[in-house]
Structures are given as C-alpha cells and as structure tokens.
Amino acid sequence: MIDTFYRVESSEGGQTDDLFIRLTSPFVDEISYCEGLNSDFKKLLDVFKEASTSKEHKAEFKEIDKEIVNGWSPSNLPKGSVQELTSSLFRNFNEFISRISDWEGNLVVYLSPAQIELDKINAWIQWIEQALQLSIPHRIRFMVIDFKEESKMEELAKSKKVFTLSPNLQMDAALDELSQAGDPNDPGTQFRRAFVQLTQAIGKRDILTMKKYGTKALEIAQANQWPHMKAVVHMALGSAYLGFKNNKQALDEYEAAYQASLKAYETGEKEYQGCGPVAITALFSKGTVFLSEKNYTNAIPVYLTAKNLAIKISENAKKLPEKIEDGQYSQMEAWRLLGYCLAQTKAPDIEIFSAYFASLVISEGLPKEQRENMATAETKAELQKLSEKLGNKISIQFLL
C-alpha cells in the first residue's frame, strides 16, 4: 500500500506539493550507506536529465523544469565521520530544492534499502536516529516503513521529530482518489487507476477483483504498447499468487513478466533498455519459487538464463552513452545461486567451485556496499571448503 502511495504521489497525478524520491541503496554500514544514497540521488538526476522528454521519467520529478538540474550535480561526499557524511548528504538535498523557484513543497526522501541483512536492521535504524540529531533543512523529510506486528522502530517513533502515519481503511479511499487524478480518458490515468485497484485487491486477498483489474491493466498496457508496464502487472500478480501459496500460477506470471520485458529489451530501443533488468528480476523471482520448493534441478536453468542475460546487459551497457544498470550485480547473484543449486543437487565439486568462483570474481568489480554482504562472505566460505576438498585438482583456467 505504501509503495502504491509513493508511485501515485511521485507521479504527475500527485495531490501534494511535495516532491517524492525513492532511494534504494543497500545498507551494509553507515558510511557506505551515505555514499550509496548520494550515488542513488545522482542517478535519479541523471535519469531526469537524459530522459526529460519522456513522460514516464519526467513524472519522477513532476513539473520541475529540466533546466534546474541540467547544470548541477550533487557534490561527492568528503571523507570523514558518519555525521560529516550525513550532513553533506543533507546539504546536497537542500542545494537541489533551493534551485527550484516558485515551489514551496518539501523534498520527501523515501528510504527503502534494496538489501539489508537481518542483523543490520538495528544499525540502519541507529543511523536514522543519529541523522535526526543533526540539523536537517526544514524542507527535507524522510519516509520509512515499519510493521506494527513486528515493529523495529518503536523507540524511533517516540521522537518529537517523527510523525507516524498508520494506514487504515480510509487509506484505500485516499489512494482511490489519487489514482483518478488527471484526464479520465488518458490511458495513463486509466492504467494507474486499474493498477491501484489491483494492488488493493491483492492486499485484501480478493482474488476475483485482483484478476479483474489485473486483466484490465494488462489490456491497457497491451493497447498502448507498454511492454514494461505489462511486466510490472505480471510481477505484481506473481507476488500475489506466491503469497497465496499458488506456486504454479506465480511461476506463470513471472514467466509472462520475463517474456514481456525481454521482448521489449531485445528491440534495442533506448526507451526499453531498462526492461533488461526487469527480465532478470522476473527470472530471480522464478528461482525463488523453485528454491522455496527445494526444486533445485528446475532452478538451475533459470539462474543460467539470468546469468547469460546479465552478461548481455553488461556488454550492451558498454556501447551506450546513457547510464543504465550494467548487469554486474545480477551476474554475481546468478552465479552464486547457481553454485548453491549445483551443491544441493550433488553436482561435481569442480562445477560448484567454478560457479562460486565466478561470483566472487565479479563481485570485485562492484561498489563496496554491493559486494560486502553476508552472501559474499558465505561464497568465500564455500570456496574455502571446496578448495580444501579439491586440493591440486583445481584448474586455474575458468570461463566466465
């Protein structure tokens, strides 16, 4: 529900004057997190600069004129303490909004780490608590999600600087109203309306209504040749069916998402380059289903396909002047999960070693916050065990 609110409010149909941006940098430690947030912010502005004529991307920044950011970029964070880096990050946010004339809204930064290990959650919350003690510019707001049933932020919520919004039944009505903003004859408005209805039905576990609006959203996307939006709908349906314990239907939806996004990506058109990573996400989702069933045999070809597509994305990214996801992180994860599945199926040790080794080699080319995680540590541990078992049998030649 919160994600739906963000999607609506960060679009041109948003009802407040506030500007919503979502930063998804993984959390490993405080310093790399600050650097990751600043990097995410830069990437958002780069997308806006390079695709300011695209209605889809322009919606990320509502009606803000592209000239405001075309001549400016956030400063690199200096070396120093966590507090110094956090303050510098705040200054970048403040510098951005100070450049926008005739606008009195707030910059709402939605902190949504793409990856955070369970034993790191408290450190992330502690970083937020420390950030609240700093001098935050008065037009900067931060938004995070907590769950009442398993709250991790009860102490944080007691701060006088924190406002807690508990979604209730009226939230659906509010989202309903937001989704209808704009021209009712506009396909974008119609799609947004159908998608909001879809996500609300999923939340209520109303399968019949979910199917109705899922079909409607897909029909709108098909009629307007929006393959990337078809993929988004199929992904939402796949996640819903997975939650309903209907693994077969979840796999069908994830496969449909993969096919729609792959077809768009393989056109080679600039506007669909972002569909490559979506296709990989769909494959990883399929893999997750198979792993949950301990069906490692079927998971292996899925991760092989994900690995090959990630390599293709990396190769294509080198040819493009635009900054897009280059597929390296996906390569690392695909190789790692492939190694895990091979181990579970009792494949030859050298094959398992080769997959884990490829994952580790690729991780070395990634930013610190992406490569230094628990999964990488586990990969190193598995490699150590395998190298001891294989001894001198390990070949130094390896085909990535």
Image: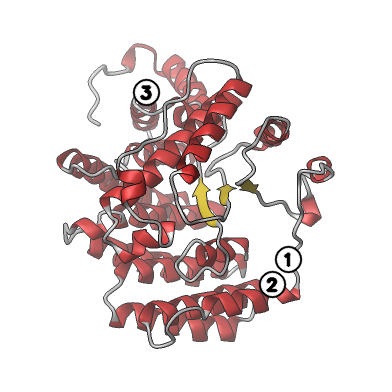
Question: Which badge, 1 or 3, comes first in the chain's sequence?
Answer: 1
Label 2, label 1: how far apart the Cα atoms are: 6 Å
For the residue labelled by badge 2, is the local secondary structure a helix, a strand or a loop?
A: helix
Residue drawn at (37%, 81%) of the image: 187
Question: Which badge, 3 or 2, comes first in the chain's sequence?
Answer: 2
Count of numbered labels shown in the rendering: 3
Q: Label 3 near label 1: C-beta < 8 Å?
A: no
Residue named by callout 2? 171
Residue named by callout 1? 167
Assess disc 3: are there few (<14), some (14-19) or many (≥20) residues with their C-alpha within 10 Å of its C-alpha: few
Residue named by callout 3? 364
Say which amino acid is labelled 3: Glu
Q: Between tags 1 and 3, which lies in front? A: 1
Query: Residue 252: x and y, percent?
Result: 42, 70
Seen in the picture, residue 106 relative to 372 is either above or below; the reply is: below
Query: Residue 365: x and y, percent?
Result: 34, 26
Query: Residue 174: x and y, percent?
Result: 65, 75
Seen in the picture, residue 181 relative to 118 is either above or below; the reply is: below
Seen in the picture, residue 308 relative to 240 is either above or below; the reply is: above
